[in-house]
Image: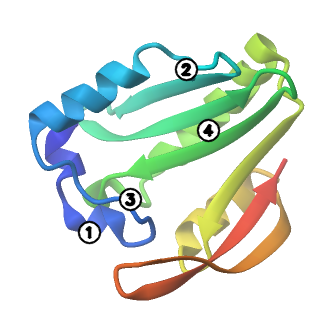
Amino acid sequence: MYEGLIDPANYRYIPQEPPPTVDDLTRRYRKLESRRSPDGTEAWLNWALIGLDGKAHGYVQATIHLDSKEAWIAYFVFSPSQRLGYAKEALDALLPALREAYGIGKFNAEIDTRNVASIRLVESLGFALTRHVEHADEFKGAISDEYHYSL
């Protein structure tokens, strides 16, 4: 995962930066291994996208609000693997699995308005635009507006 995560091109539409070291990434993953927020109200679920070639191509995440049965999804596909269907395939499997395992009634995604490929992906899955947040964030010298989508 580290090799794919260190490419700065992956971070164009998100405020995060590449992990500085393998040890930093390891610490982050150890925190996520609990699969729960410290207060126990959220499930933190993460999956690596491993292709038939045996290589990591990115990851998908779901944060489940256990009381409301809502999930916030995110996906991160490494630059060389973008637009090859990895995120779509993962989400096609993930959404029904989360409905079954957690009784999820609503899925949410927040997307930088400049990220056209990501917008097309969630729309292709049936997500509807529910909100436009102007100046949602400012990073890398640019203002980021955000779309909120729900399914």
Examine the rendering and report whether any part of residue 82 can be seen.
yes
Residue type, label 3? Gln
Q: Which residue is mark 2?
A: 38
Please identify the quarter of the rendering in which residue 69 is found: top right
Question: Which badge, 2 or 1, comes first in the chain's sequence?
Answer: 1
Q: Secondary structure at mark 4?
A: helix
Q: How is the image coloured?
A: rainbow
Q: Which residue is mark 4?
A: 91
Q: Which residue is mark 1?
A: 9
Question: Which badge, 4 or 3, comes first in the chain's sequence?
Answer: 3
The foreground one among 137 and 83 is 137
Q: Give me the C-alpha separation between circle 1 and circle 4.
A: 22 Å
Give x and y (percent) for residue 127.
80, 55
Q: Give me the C-alpha separation between circle 4 and circle 3.
A: 14 Å
Residue 100 versus residue 149 in the image, above or below: above
Please identify the quarter of the rendering in which residue 79 is found: bottom left
Question: Which badge, 3 or 1, comes first in the chain's sequence?
Answer: 1
Circle 2 residues within 10 Å: few <14, some 14–19, many ≥20: few
Give x and y (percent) for residue 129.
83, 66
Circle 4 residues within 10 Å: few <14, some 14–19, many ≥20: some
